Image (tube, helix red, strand yellow):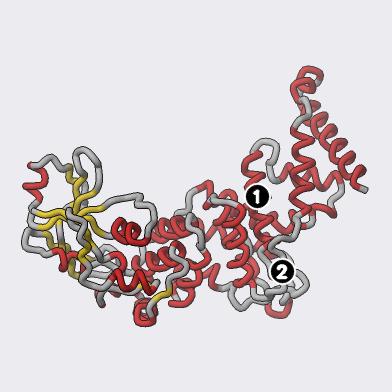
Amino acid sequence: MKKYLVGGAVRDQLLGRQVKERDWVIVGSSVEEMIKQGFKPVGKEFPVFLHPETHDEYALARTEKKVGHGYHGFEFYASPEVTLEEDLKRRDLTVNAMAQDEDGTIIDPYNGQDDLKKRVLRHVSEAFAEDPVRILRIARFASRFHDFTIAPETMKLMQEMVGSGEVDALVRERVWQELERALCEDHPERFIEVLRECGALKVIFPEIDALFGIPGSIEWHPEVDTGIHLLMALKRAVELTNDPVIRFAVLVHDVGKSLTEKEKLPKHHGHCEKGVVLVKELCRRLHVPKKYQDLAELVTEHHGNCHKALEHSAKAALKFLERLDAFRRPKRFENFLIACKADTQGRLGFNEHPYLEADFLKNVYEKCAVIDTKEIIEKFKGEEIAKEIHKKRLKVIQNVIGSSL
């Protein structure tokens, strides 16, 4: 029985990156022997165990065979006779198909170290095409290792997988899982770019794919293409926040522009309201968590009004804050402003452009938030309380606007 450190831990170690998780492969053992040594079995589809002390994952060396369609269509075989090289061959990319023995020696039968030096993401074998999740994984790896390129033969294989309909079998929960992980990386726009290049974006995220080629008014969008604006806004969101919830809202905020009638282009009147319908459908289809959907809908529906905040009267500004539920949900309001800032600065030549509209809304919100509501509650009753709070907030905003004239 021999154990080997495998996968991402070996890769990240060679890249000089922090190793967050350690996975191990056991060669020459059996389920019975692992249990006898105190390992806890946790694998549902193949033999995986937790170490009794470190809780690292240990898996028996295994091979796999495609027997059905999609992610779950595999038959696994694990036994003491399966070699380390056979186990590594079933992995997705050469940079993930390396192992390290207990003496520190790197076992690299598929030239992963060479691809690390060349900064290339390359499939290990033709078996890559048997699992559609690998398309999502390679797109996510591209968002993490943004200076890596995808080997031409690997991209060709991915395109063939899309063409064969294999991507249609993706489990929606897994699609969301990979997107969420990509949104936590430094370059989530690469996730979108890779999926689009191989053709999977149109299948998995049709609402987003449809934005590419849709023109925007050059007056407001010098980059013109709405899909390009989307990628630029997402890049700006990464610079402004590490919160994937905000980044997701930025990713989908303009999907309504795909519904604009051709004769009305490049203007997109009503795209905010139209977009909410598409965001709801996307979130329903992928089982997107509520906190993501909530902010995404808010940003999609109201980002246009946010960009016009300096044109608002005091009454309109207060009504807008109330529609955003800013006084009861200040953190969400703050996240909304960050997303809108990413949108307005995610344009050609606007990356460092001041977003005065957000500054204005934040200023009036903060001044309204310090109003002593306790005193009002003591003096008034019933509906008069809300009316008095509204009146005081309105006066505050009128003063802010008046002092800026």
Q: Earlier in the sequence, mark 1 or mark 2?
A: 1
How far across and how far down the image is residue 75, in percent? Answer: 17, 64
Q: Residue furthest top?
A: 378
Q: Secondary structure at mark 1?
A: helix
> In whole angstroms, how far apart are the C-alphas of marks 1 and 2?
22 Å
Give the x, y percent position of residue 225. 65, 75
Q: Quadrant of residue 165?
A: bottom left
Which residue in the structure is indicated by mark 2?
349
Front in this rendered view, residue 376 or 96:
96
- Pick whichever, 110 or 216, lies toward us: 110
Q: Which residue is mark 1?
A: 336
Q: Is residue 298 above or below residue 163?
A: above
Viewer-side label of 1, 2: 2
Give percent across and percent down for residue 156.
37, 82
Asked whether the residues under the numbered discs 1 and 2 touch, taking CB atoms below 8 Å apart as contact, a structural biologist would say no
Question: Amino acid under label 2?
Answer: Gly
Front residue of 284/327: it is: 327
Task: Give amino acid for label 1.
Answer: Phe
Q: Which mark is residue 151?
A: none
Above or below residue 398? Residue 237 is below
- Write down the quadrant of residue 4 in the picture: bottom left
Number of other residues with Cα within 10 Å of mark 2, as a class: few under 14, some 14 to 19, many 20 or more: few
Q: Residue at the location (65% across, 58% down)?
A: 342
Residue 277 in view here: no
Query: 259 left or right of 354?
Result: left
Name the secondary structure under disc 2. loop
